[in-house]
Amino acid sequence: MISFREQLIWIIYYLLFGYFLAAANDILMYFLNKTKMNTVLKYIIQLFFWLGLAYLATSYMMRISEGYLTIYTFGFFAIGALIHLSYFSKHFRNDLDRLTDFLKKVLSRVKKLLIIIVFPKEVMIFLRRLLPKKQSIINLKKKFLKLFKKNIVQPNDKE
């Protein structure tokens, strides 16, 4: 027999896990919407994501409830997800925006630091002198386009 206290603890766990499932879905959708990807590929990613979460949910449920499968388990998963979607989803997405901006700044600084560590200043100066400047590359491209430009033959001009 399952005690009332134990069932109450399970309900809290299930609510929190439902909240986690909805938050994980928000994170996935946020990053999928940020990327420019084929729609079919997005659906495939979502399918594998939800298959993984379904496996995680069932193993979590079996571990928490020690093998008991109660009827209200999935109901409290859904209630936890609805709590997240109705009250916290919009603020969560705003926090994700701030987090990605912060991570971009941190990664750009780390990238600059790694470049300084990996390539000494003398090597960078040598590479800048060795490689052509952007304007000279554009001029070279224009010259090649003029040189290899196709002569359009008019239908009246037959050679």
Image (spheres, rainbow, N blue to C red):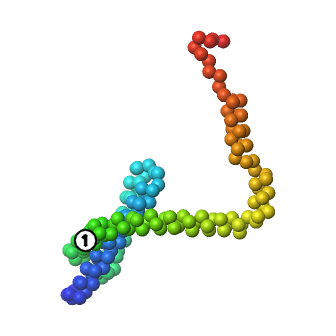
Q: Is residue 5 visible?
A: yes
- The answer to which quarter of the image holds residue 56 is bottom left
In front of the other: 95 or 158? 95
Q: Name the element at disc 1.
A: helix
Identity of the amino acid at label 1?
A: Ile
Q: Residue 140, how many percent across, how many down? A: 72, 38
User: As drawn, is 117 to the left or to the right of 79?
Assistant: right
> Looking at the rendering, in which quadrant would you find the N terminus?
bottom left
User: As drawn, is 73 to the left or to the right of 137?
Assistant: left
Q: Residue 120, how many percent across, how many down? A: 76, 65
User: As drawn, is 80 to the left or to the right of 95?
Assistant: left
Tell me which residue sits at (44%, 64%) in the image.
Answer: 97
Asked if residue 125 is positioned above or below residue 8 in the image, the reply reads above
User: Which residue bears the numbered disc 1?
Assistant: 79
- The answer to which quarter of the image holds residue 151 is top right
Tell me which residue sits at (57%, 14%) in the image.
Answer: 155
Q: Residue 64, how many percent across, how many down? A: 32, 81
